[in-house]
Image: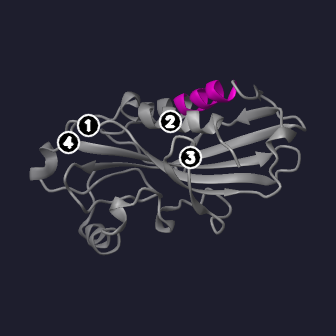
Amino acid sequence: MKLTAPILALSATLLLAGCASQTPTPSQYSGFLSDYTQLQPAQSASGAPVMRWVSPDFKPENYRSVLVERPLFYPAPTPDAQVNQQTLDEIALYLQQAMRLELAGRMRVVEHPDTDTLVLRSAITAVNLSPEGLKVYEVVPVALLAAAASTAAGTRDLNTEIYVELEVIEARNSQPMARVVRKGHGLQLENDSTQLRLKDIKPALDVWAKDARSFKP
């Protein structure tokens, strides 16, 4: 997947400082969440940096069940030879199943909401494949992109990153209780001809699911 010269220029001028950021920056927010203005830097249960907001009205003891919606890709990406539709489907299904499994140790997981149900909505907003050692790369929430690289860089290992935005809402009245924006790191790909597979992203998905179970206001 190749990027045009204007996008390369934009990456070099605007994203150079942001490429080392441990959390998504506002320019990388996708629009999936209805409000980003109250997000503040925080740490997940595993110690990972996140951007988070929790409603002052959120009282976990008021809820006994959770409905985990299937994660979306937002906006919908265009699959290609390196990241195909089957892999995208597997990533979304695995994340949903992993979060259900983890949350089942804390709450009752349901298929239909009740008055005591929290609904967990999530969207995978970007998957970034960046050549190892390159400092300037592209992370665009509105698409699924492989990083720009020179021909010589085609043999370098590719670092994998995946971005997610989550929202917890109260089923009874649709009021938001929490919002989280974060990114995770998967395994390295051998080069830019290597197809991305679910196994390459699973480490990040597993951490997200465990953090969902251990979430505290």
| Residue to which mark 2 is pinned | 207
| Kind of residue sitting beneath label 4 | Asp
Where residue 42 appears, as percent x and y from the top left, is: 57, 56
Is residue 14 shown left or right of residue 101? left
| Kind of residue sitting beneath label 3 | Ser
- Viewer-proximal residue among 191 and 184: 184
Give the distance between the C-alpha atoms of the residues marked 4 and 3, in whole angstroms: 28 Å
Q: Earlier in the sequence, mark 4 or mark 1?
A: 4
- Disc ID at residue 28: none
The part of the chain drawn in magenta is 94-104
Label 3 environment density (alpha carbons within 10 Å; few <14, some 14–19, many ≥20): many
Q: Quadrant of residue 98?
A: top right
| Kind of residue sitting beneath label 2 | Val
Q: Earlier in the sequence, mark 2 or mark 4?
A: 4
**What residue occupies the far left of the structure in this picture?**
152
Residue located at (41% from left, 30% from top) = 198
Is residue 125 shown left or right of residue 22? right
- Disc ID at residue 44: 3
Tags 4 and 1 touching, CB below 8 Å: yes
| Residue to which mark 1 is pinned | 189
| Kind of residue sitting beneath label 1 | Leu
Where residue 102 appears, as percent x and y from the top left, is: 62, 27
Residue located at (49% from left, 47% from top) = 48
Where residue 177 appears, as percent x and y from the top left, is: 76, 52
Give the distance between the C-alpha atoms of the residues marked 1 and 2, in whole angstroms: 20 Å
| Residue to which mark 4 is pinned | 157
- Vertical position of residue 97 compared to residue 137: above or below: above
Residue located at (65% from left, 42% from top) = 215
Q: Earlier in the sequence, mark 3 or mark 1?
A: 3
- Viewer-proximal residue among 123 and 79: 123
Q: Earlier in the sequence, mark 4 or mark 3?
A: 3
